[in-house]
Image (tube, rainbow, N blue to C red):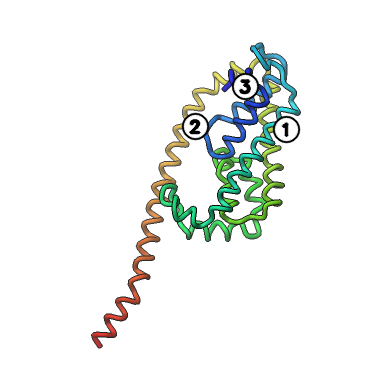
Amino acid sequence: MEHFLATWGYLALFGATLLSSLGVPVGSEIAIGYAGALASGQLVTTGHDHLNLLLVILVAVAGELVGSSIGYAIGLLGGRPLVDRLGKYVLLTHKDLDRAEAWFDGRGESVVFFARLIPLVRSFISLAAGLAEMARLKFALYTVLGCAIWCAALAAIGYSLGSSWHRVIKDFSYAGYVAAALVVLAIAVIIYHRVITIRRERLVGATVGTTPAVARDDARQL
């Protein structure tokens, strides 16, 4: 990623943030931070060894907005038929959509804004907002606000580190392994909980669906 950024500069940054907003794990956080470090002018690299901090932030926000808009459109246009076709692969049901719509009603703005400041969650909130049919302009506005804070903070950290970027990243690499392990564990727990919940909901649905038939049989016997 660092070599890609040093070679392609703003274009690489735009692509990384766009893909990350679509849920593709390309490490956009590292990309934005490293771009900020390049903007400090203290790193010696080949290619784009000096970027502008303001442009780094603007390009990163633009990439995230475009990627988020694509994710939003997929959720909005796909809607419930999308859940019918693909929901079983990502453990989504129509009841999840009902809960999402109820959650977004009246608080969608704050949900989108604060989700943009939470790792992992920020990559998938666009799809949820689209499925919940959140208003487009509100979605775009709060996406830009949240992404601007996130990108500015990461770029500023990279800029302040400057020539110390590689040393600090190396020091944090071990902590990153621990964090990754915790994330994997958390995802496993969430998946297990979702599987149990979906099985329970299907069982209840099947029971409710057979109740009329049972009642008719009882009526015939009488």
In depth, the one of 77 and 31 nearer the eye is: 77
In depth, the one of 212 and 153 nearer the eye is: 212
Disc 1/disc 3 C-alpha distance (Å): 16 Å
- Going by the numbered disc 2, the residue's amino acid type is Ala
- Considering only order in the chain, which callout, 3 or 1, is on the residue closer to the N terminus? 3
SS at mark 2 in the image: helix
Disc 2/disc 1 C-alpha distance (Å): 29 Å
- Going by the numbered disc 1, the residue's amino acid type is Leu
Residue holding disc 2: 179
Name the quarter where the C terminus is drawn: bottom left
Q: Nearer the viewer, mark 3 or mark 2?
A: 3
SS at mark 3 in the image: helix
Residue holding disc 1: 58
Q: In the image, what residue occupies the spot 60% across and 48% down?
A: 72
Coordinates of residue 120 in the picture (x, y in percent): 54, 39
Coordinates of residue 205 in the picture (x, y in percent): 38, 65
- Considering only order in the chain, which callout, 1 or 2, is on the residue closer to the N terminus? 1
Disc 3/disc 2 C-alpha distance (Å): 25 Å
Asked if 89 appears above or below 31 in the picture, the reply is below
Coordinates of residue 197 in the picture (x, y in percent): 40, 55
- Going by the numbered disc 3, the residue's amino acid type is Leu
